[in-house]
């Protein structure tokens, strides 16, 4: 097991001004031999935490800075011959000195914690922490930051208007001040609410004929999760991976349960409950190879543009006739580029895309998908519109792509992992990368 400590430091510091390392990271690499027999059965991904002590020194004075807020998001477990690589990052404290002279930053003791994830509702406990320190004789110096001679007074100590300037300000007693360390790892989730809001056209409505249910607007809970899956093209009989779990998948940013809709079973129409959430899912581009018309191998990259995602879960009726439902909906458009036919590039231009956005509606079945917090599998079919803007130099390729890709009954199957809700108990953080639909262990 090796740990590489990475960071950027300023070229120089200023007396009485904070010096803060930028982009600090701990890259932990664990070989297959070290992992053997360590991870619980069924582990599909591993997240991590790192707590590093950095020794700060200047002219014989020392202080300790704790880099204790470094978190690594979950990464898939490698195959038997591969290394597990965790990238820890987060906020670290600044250092302020009151005298000129070189500041040195040296790595000290570090505590590492692995958090295995199985994709199940209940996650295994974190493994016992591992304490390590630089080997004897190892050069653990991270950086040297010079602080030039002469001082810049502490603003709180600046003289008033009646003070007389001197040729050189006196040097205050030498000291090293380290700001308090962040106590919690930085959340991997976005800190801003998702754009947009609930799209009423994707919200399932109560059965007709009953008393209107009560609508309650709620503040919602901000969180994030991974959602991965497949998109099938019916005409081509093939599929491409969406948000590939093995290739830096993106989060879905969710504001969970911003509205509840309810009606008690004693009222006309019977019991009804629905929780509405919304989010945004920026998907990475995908690459896929298909056989067009049954014999031409075509490789292309696909760019997804998604509108706000509306997620609704709930129940209709009372036991024993209660029915659960789960639905997610959004608008999506596709752009195709970097196309090759039989290995030969085909220039389709920069705007070869579906002529208009199309509706995506996915459904989850109880108990596999109970609510947005637990996540689970969802699936549905979409109709891909005709393509436009395809071709360059006067060549119109719209009909070629429409004939190959457009049409109904294209299956989309996704699996959402549990929602990570930062700063809450049992928050499922960092988020779990779920397995692809149909590949459950």
Image: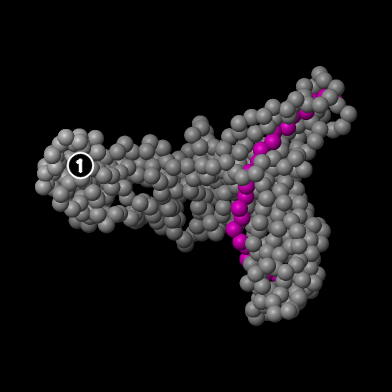
Stretch in magenta: 269-290
Residue marked by disc 1: 153
Residue 343 lies left or right of residue 325; in this view the side is left
* Residue extending farthest front: 162
* Residue 150 at x, y percent in the picture: 15, 49
Query: Residue 182 is drawn in which quadrant?
Result: top left
Question: Magenta segment: does it hold 272?
Answer: yes
Instruction: Evaluate whether residue 439 shows in this view.
Output: no
Identify which residue, 154 or 373, lies in the foreground.
154
* Residue 154 at x, y percent in the picture: 22, 39
Identify which residue, 290 or 187, lies in the foreground.
187
Instruction: Evaluate whether residue 2 shows in this view.
Output: yes
The residue depicted at 77 percent of the width and 22 percent of the height is 264
Q: Secondary structure at mark 1?
A: loop
The residue depicted at 81 percent of the width and 62 percent of the height is 407
Identify which residue, 350 or 105, lies in the foreground.
350
Q: Tell me the quarter of the image containing the N terminus.
A: bottom left
Query: Residue 92 is drawn in which quadrant?
Result: top left
The residue depicted at 17 percent of the width and 46 percent of the height is 151
* Residue 16 at x, y percent in the picture: 23, 43
Query: Residue 95 is drawn in which quadrant?
Result: top left
Crowd class of label 1 (few under 14; some 14 to 19; many from 20; radius 10 Å): some
The residue depicted at 70 percent of the width and 80 percent of the height is 393
* Residue 192 at x, y percent in the picture: 54, 42
Task: Give the vertical position of 288 relative to 283 (above or below).
Answer: below
Task: Give the vertical position of 85 relative to 271 (above or below).
Answer: below
Question: Magenta segment: does it hold 56?
Answer: no
Residue 151 lies left or right of residue 240; in this view the side is left
Counting the numbered discs, the total is 1
């Amino acid at each position: 097991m090796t740990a590489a400590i990475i960071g950027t430091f300023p070229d120089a510091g200023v007396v009485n001004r904070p010096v803060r390392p930028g982009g600090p990271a701990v890259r932990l690499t664990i070989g297959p031999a070290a992992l053997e027999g360590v991870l619980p059965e069924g582990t599909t991904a591993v997240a991590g935490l790192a707590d590093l002590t950095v020794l700060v020194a200047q002219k014989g004075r020392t202080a300790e800075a704790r880099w204790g807020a470094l978190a690594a998001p979950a990464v898939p477990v490698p195959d038997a011959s591969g290394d597990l690589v965790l990238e820890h990052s987060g906020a670290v404290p600044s250092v302020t000195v009151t005298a000129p002279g070189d500041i040195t930053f040296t790595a000290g003791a570090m505590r590492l914690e692995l958090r295995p994830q199985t994709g199940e509702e209940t996650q295994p406990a974190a493994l016992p922490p591992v304490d390590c320190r630089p080997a004897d004789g190892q050069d653990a110096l991270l950086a040297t930051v010079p602080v030039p001679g002469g001082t810049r007074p502490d603003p709180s100590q600046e003289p008033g208007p009646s003070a007389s300037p001197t040729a050189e300000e006196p040097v205050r007693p030498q000291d090293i001040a380290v700001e308090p360390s962040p106590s919690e790892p930085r959340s991997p989730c976005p800190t801003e609410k998702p754009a947009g809001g609930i799209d009423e056209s994707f919200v399932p409505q109560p059965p007709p004929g009953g008393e209107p249910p009560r609508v309650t607007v709620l503040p919602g809970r901000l969180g994030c999760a991974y959602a991965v899956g497949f998109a099938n093209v019916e005409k081509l009989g093939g599929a491409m991976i969406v948000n590939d779990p093995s290739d830096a998948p993106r989060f879905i940013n969710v504001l969970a349960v911003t509205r509840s809709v309810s009606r008690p079973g004693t009222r006309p129409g019977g019991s009804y409950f629905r929780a509405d959430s919304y989010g945004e899912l920026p998907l990475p581009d995908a690459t896929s190879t298909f056989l067009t018309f049954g014999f031409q191998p075509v490789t292309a990259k696909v760019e997804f543009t998604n509108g706000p995602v509306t997620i609704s879960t709930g129940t209709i009726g009372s036991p024993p006739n209660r029915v659960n439902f789960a639905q997610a909906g959004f608008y999506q458009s596709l752009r195709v580029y970097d196309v090759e036919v039989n290995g030969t590039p085909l220039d389709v231009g920069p705007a070869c895309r579906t002529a208009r956005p199309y509706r995506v509606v996915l459904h989850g079945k109880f108990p596999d998908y109970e609510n947005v917090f637990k996540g689970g599998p969802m699936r549905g079919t979409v109709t891909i519109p005709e393509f436009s803007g395809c071709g360059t130099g006067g060549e119109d390729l719209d009909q070629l792509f429409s004939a190959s890709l457009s049409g109904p009954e294209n299956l989309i199957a996704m699996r959402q992992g549990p929602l990570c809700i930062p700063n809450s108990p049992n928050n499922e953080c960092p988020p779990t990368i779920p397995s692809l639909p149909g590949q459950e262990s």
